Image (tube, rainbow, N blue to C red):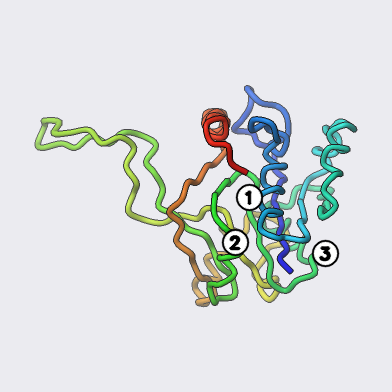
Amino acid sequence: MYEGIILAGGNAWRLKPEIWIPKPLLKLNSSTLLERQINWLSKYDFKNIFVTIDADFLNYVFQEELNLLSKYSNIEWIVEKEKLGTGGAIKNAIKQIYSNVFYVFNIDDIVFYDPRTLFNVEYTTNILVSKPRLGYGRIHLRDNRVSRFQEKPVLDFYVSCGHYVLNKSIIDYLPDEGDWERNALPKLAKDKKLGALKYSGEWLTINNFKEYLNAKEYFKNNKLY
């Protein structure tokens, strides 16, 4: 049985002042970001999905929106009374999840692949990695002369896509509060307990208003789950 955790807390400060609603409720065509991510996991037979949220989210959501989300019978909400960061959120969720091995990802990292394949990397913890694209066009120079332009090239190194498979055995690596990317991942790598799966597909992030508009346009032009 596959189980997943969606990390849906955070203030989304970089979307302000254009956007003031909680990030999980951002609209991507006919569905919200949260619905898209739930539907994505459900498509691949994830039977239990845990969503970490904070009290501010519940205070914001209107009753009709709660009713809309209640149609998902496989969802369990994990409410943080105070903000714990990704590390604290995962550590808190581990206490409620049933499986020893499970999927975890940031709600604002959208990928298009079968998440079950990340379970096949034989390490304690596995991470999905991709080569990022430069946010600017690159200018090639010869001495002081521009030789050519290159539009937003793919860079030749890997970064985290914000998607992971974890084993409960790593709980001691997780901080009670704070980002696990900074506190736990470097220690796991040092102890040779971190595997990676290279991903070359489309990867959308929603960290700011421009990226949100790009994601909306992508889903408008590509009728995908």
Tags 2 and 3 touching, CB below 8 Å? no
Write the residue at 65% across / 46% down.
Answer: 107
Residue 32 percent location from the top left of the image? 70, 36
Q: Which residue is mark 1?
A: 106
Give the amino acid type for the residue marked by disc 2 in the picture: Tyr
In which quadrant will I find the C terminus? Answer: top right
Name the image quarter holding residue 159. bottom left
Vertical side of 50 occupied by 20: above or below:
above
Between disc 2 and disc 3, whose residue precedes?
3
Marks 3 and 1, how far apart at CA: 18 Å
**Picture quadrant where residue 168 is located:** bottom right
Disc 2: which residue? 164
Q: Residues within 10 Å of mark 1 (few under 14, many from 20)?
A: some
* Residue 188 percent across, percent down from the top left: 55, 71
Question: Marks 2 and 1: CB-CB under 8 Å?
Answer: no
Q: Position of residue 201 (x, y in %)?
A: 46, 50
Q: Closer to the N terminus: mark 2 or mark 1?
A: 1
Q: Earlier in the sequence, mark 3 or mark 1?
A: 3
> Callout 3 environment at 10 Å: few (<14), some (14 to 19), or many (20+)?
few
Measure the alpha-carbon separation of dots 2 and 1.
9 Å
State the residue in front, 166 or 118. Answer: 118
Cα separation between marks 2 and 3: 18 Å
Horizontal arrangement in the rendering, residue 155 relative to residue 23 (left or right): left
Assign a secondary structure to mark 3: loop
Question: CB under 8 Å between callouts 3 and 1?
Answer: no
Q: Which residue position is annotated with label 3?
A: 96
168 left or right of 61?
A: left
* Viewer-closest of 81 and 25: 25
Image point 83% across, 32% down: which residue? 60
**Local secondary structure at mark 2:** strand
Mark 2 neighbour density, 10 Å: few (under 14) some (14–19) many (20 or more): many
